Image (cartoon, rainbow, N blue to C red):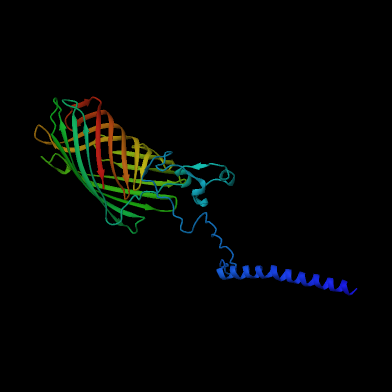
Amino acid sequence: MILIRLFAALLLGAASLGTLSFAAPAMAQDQQWRAAGSIAREEEFQPIQRLPATEILPGTYKLPPYPSTGSPGNPAVPARLVAENPPELNIINDDVEKQDALFLTEDEVFTSRPKLSPAKDGILQTLAIQSTWIAGSGDNIGMTEVSGSATLGFPAPSRESPLLLTPGYGMIFLVGPDSIEAPSTLYQAYLTTTWMSQLTEKWGTVLSVTPGVYSDFQLTNSDAFRVSGMAILTHKTTDRLQLMFGVVYLNRDDIPILPVAGLIWTPGDDYRLELTFPRPRYSQLFSYGEGYEDWWYVTGEFGGGTWSVEHPIGQNDNLTLTDYRLLLGMERKTDGGGKSFVEIGYVFGRQLEYEHDPAKLDMSDTILLRSGWWY
């Protein structure tokens, strides 16, 4: 029994020595590892900062620049994805917006182009020069007309009811006729006074009077001074349709007075029909850009006039020229009422006659070229 206890004590002692022998190297190795240093641990955990949500329409959004040039149905800028434009400017329903790869043209995104101002700030409204050439020679008289004018505007009593004063001067150079004596140059100097007023939301008026001198400046008498005028009443039936009627007093020997009647219809911003007598006109926009619009048009015109001239027998007489014109033209309108234009036309129904001389000259049809510039 004593031997058994002694043997157990020896086994426990051996086990203890073994444990100590194994622990010592482990502790020594741990001590060496710690002495050699360790990897620095991260600071206290911080959550990752998420990126801010992307703004689909940032507060600094700016409209795309308006195209420098363009034409109806053919914008100067390429079509854009719907997502690139503010939703409030897209005049389309939600179902269409959801379609993939939907494109809108410039005209569809922006409901209308900027409008040109028809008038300028200040008194000076217009400076205009223009020239007209009518082909002809011999008894088929050729004509070259050069004229200029200026328009001054005054509130009467407000800018919405302006008073316009337009002094003008022109010269007409005649080539021919051979069979009838006629002056080589005719002159005209005039002052047109026009008052426009909007009586009500629907009704408006245009009143005009033009005293002037029309002569060859050879033997000028009282017949050279003539007064013409116009009175027109307008009615705005809808935003697109306006009616007009009135009278124009020409004070000419051939046709002293003419009625004015018709309508002005603008089915869209790119079209305008002036179905009026005696000057009908159809206009259509074909190009536009920043500060200008390009239009082509077809119009009719009643030409000619009456001048007091020196008759070949040495006394004064009244010379009347009459013609009718069908014109095709192109014009560029600019902001503030300016424009430049060129026209080509067909002239027919041409006549020359004196008041006291029974001789009368019927001329052949011919062509017309005209150009002008308005500031």
Residue 38 in view: yes
Q: Nearer the viewer, residue 360 or 198?
A: 198
Residue 354 found in image quarter:
top left
214 up-or-down from 366: above or below = below
Question: Residue 212, percent across and down?
Answer: 21, 45
Question: Residue 328, percent across and down?
Answer: 32, 33
Q: Is residue 246 left or right of residue 43?
A: left
Q: Nearer the viewer, residue 209 or 121?
A: 121
Q: Is residue 220 left or right of residue 155?
A: left
The total of numbered circles placed on residues is 0
2 up-or-down from 243: above or below = below
Residue 255 in view: no
Q: Quadrant of the N terminus?
A: bottom right
Of all residues shown, which one is farthest toward the right?
1
Q: Is residue 178 left or right of residue 235?
A: left
Question: Residue 293, percent across and down?
Answer: 35, 43
Q: Residue at x 18, y 38 (%)?
A: 307
Of all residues shown, which one is farthest toward the left?
314
Question: Residue 216, percent across and down?
Answer: 14, 39
Of all residues shown, which one is farthest toward the bottom?
2
Q: Is residue 343 left or right of residue 217?
A: right
Of all residues shown, which one is farthest toward the front?
3
